[in-house]
Amino acid sequence: MNRRAQNFRPSNTFTQIWLKLSHASRLTPHALSLILTPTVYKKDFIMPGFEDLDAWKRSARLSVQIYKHFAACKDYGFKDQITRSSLSVPSNIAEGYDRSSKKDNINFLYYSKGSCAELRTQIYIGMKIEYIDKETSKAWIAETKELSRMIQGLINRLRQG
């Protein structure tokens, strides 16, 4: 059995899919493990899909909140800038994880981290010009700071591996 299959711990959903595929096809368990297990960059580090990353989930959720908040905003320049930077955070995480090299993945995580800082700046400005109330601003600022830490953690983990 290859290293990917040895290190992978299937979820209940994964097991159900595995069983259905193994019964429906003539593939051996080893062949199925090659098809269904995630990418491994290093011995013990299994690379999940970007959809499984908390940083991606939380940044996508924040982007949706920002889009909804500014749906009726008539300042199209500000609205466009803040929604684009909010969308850039999860998009760069996703794009990096779909790249074939660890170096590209790390670069896109840095782009995502930069977009997070850009978004935080725009939130501060939105609060000062009263487009965003203080309570919402504080929550979004705290979330962008946490997202930056999470993204840096992903970068550090990839560099170790």
Image: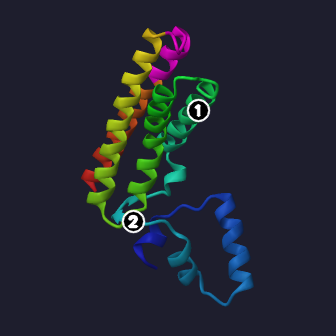
Give residue 70's position: percent from left, percent from top: 58, 26
Give residue 77's position: percent from left, percent from top: 46, 29
Q: Secondary structure at mark 1?
A: helix
Q: Residue at x 34, y 64 (%)?
A: 41
Name the one closer to the observer, 66 or 42.
Answer: 66
Which residue is tagged 2? 40
The correct choice, above or below, for 93 with respect to 150 in the image is: below
Q: Quadrant of the C terminus?
A: bottom left
Q: Residue at x 74, y 82 (%)?
A: 23
Give residue 125's position: percent from left, percent from top: 40, 16
| Neighbourhood count class around disc 1 (C-alpha, 10 Å): few under 14, some 14–19, many 20 upward | some
The correct choice, above or below, for 40 with respect to 161 in the image is: below
Q: Determine which quarter of the picture holds residue 119.
A: top left
1 or 2: tag closer to the N-terminus = 2
What distance separates the C-alpha of mark 1 from that of mark 2?
35 Å
Which amino acid, mark 1? Tyr
Name the one closer to the observer, 69 or 110.
Answer: 69
**Segment colored magenta:** 130-142
Q: Residue at x 39, y 37 (%)?
A: 150
Magenta stretch holds residue 139: yes
| The disc label shown at residue 113, or none | none
The correct choice, above or below, for 147 with respect to 104 in the image is: above
Answer yes or no: do the residues labelled 1 and 2 have beta carbons within 8 Å? no
| The disc label shown at residue 67, or none | 1
Give residue 133's position: percent from left, percent from top: 55, 10
